[in-house]
Image (cartoon, helix red, strand yellow):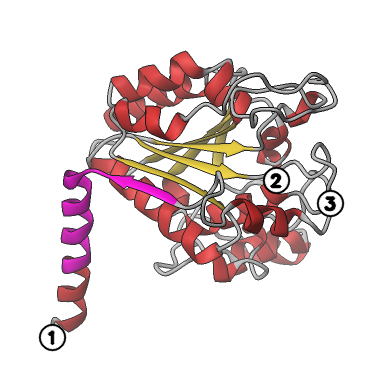
Amino acid sequence: MSKEKIAICPEFYDIMPPEYRDLVEQSTYGKEDRGWKDIGQSKELIEEHSLCAGCPESIAFRYILASLPNPEDTVMVGSTGCTSLVFPHVAVHNIHSLFGNQNAIASGLKRALSVRFPNRIKDVVVLAGDGATVDIGLDMTLQAWFRQEKFTTICFDNELYANTGGQESGLMQKGFVAKMAPVGKKFEKVNLPEIARESGCCYVVMCTVSKPNLVEKVIKNAIILAREVGPTYLQIYTPCILEIGKDSMEGLQEMRDSERPGERFKYKEYITDEAKKYLAELEASKKEALVAP
């Protein structure tokens, strides 16, 4: 989907929809330094969406799409939930899996792409909610990590089943009362980042999307490391403002409050020595290329 691959035939240019012309001419594909600052200028970074007004997931989606290091050769695997309302608007190859089996689909896909395109980088990125990742799909999530499948898993953690009325999920806070969890959560929030670390992920991050430059950094790191080192996992807080009783303009502040020191979404990063070494080598290569005559 880079500009080298998509071109409008000159004879048909005048009759093409203006939205498609803008998509082709203003896309960030092929731009080496593409990132979150391109949001608002390119249609493939979700000009419109069908989520609720002010939904933090829409912000997270834009940052992630803008940060993909290789979008034209990336396939995203989604699952049933609020995220599936956005994938039809995404100008990146994507697969809608059954609820919970997204990591199994991604495992087969990554292997097939490696065979079909042995000399080309093909990134696979899983994006699902907490219900699909830690509840219904936990077995397939863990098995992909155990097998060291080389792709990135991103969990949009809104701490409940937001798409179906506010049921309790394993990532809900202890004691939280939701519309369809009236007695409150009885046990602590499942520590999936720690489980990911113990299950063989080489790079694990917990954060919110209140800081776009940070989101860009961890997305790029996770995808690049998954190519060569091993599975990576990102748990990103995207609160459902509708279900937690917030106004449409309060999502950003909710995330900022939740990432304060001592709070449950304070930034946490785990990276293996092998992953650190790989990133350091890449950074050294970039510096050498800059000073080369």
Determine crowd level at label 1: few under 14, some 14-19, many 20+ residues with C-alpha closer than 10 A.
few
Q: Is residue 81 visible?
A: yes
Mark 3 / mark 2, whichever is N-terminal: 3
Residue plotted at (51% across, 51% down):
266
Q: Give the residue at mark 3.
A: 53
The answer to whether residue 278 is left or right of residue 82 is left
Crowding near the residue tagged with mark 2, few <14, some 14–19, many ≥20 C-alpha atoms within 10 Å: some
Secondary structure character of the magenta stretch overall: helix
Task: Say which residue appears at 45% left-offset and 14% top-offset.
Answer: 139
**What's the amino acid at mark 3?**
Ala
- Say which quadrant the C terminus sits in: bottom left
Q: Nearer the viewer, mark 3 or mark 2?
A: 3
**Magenta-colored span:** 268-284
Q: Secondary structure at mark 3?
A: loop
Image point (50%, 57%), residue name: 215
Whichever of labels 1 and 3 marks the residue nearer the N terminus, that label is: 3
Residue 162's spot in the image, x, y percent?
A: 75, 31
CA–CA distance in space, label 1 to label 3: 51 Å
What percent of the width, then of the height, locates residue 71? 47, 51
Residue 174's place in the image compared with 121, above or below, is above
**Is residue 70 in view from this perspective?**
no
Quadrant for residue 188, please give it.
Answer: top right
Q: Could you tell me how far apart the alpha carbons at marks 3 and 2 are, in whole angstroms? A: 16 Å
Q: Secondary structure at mark 2?
A: helix
The percent coordinates of residue 17 (x first, y second) are 77, 59
Q: Crowding near pointer 3: few (<14 within 10 Å), some, many (20+)?
A: few
Q: Which residue is mark 2?
A: 89
The amino acid at mark 2 is His
Q: Nearer the viewer, residue 87 or 2?
A: 87
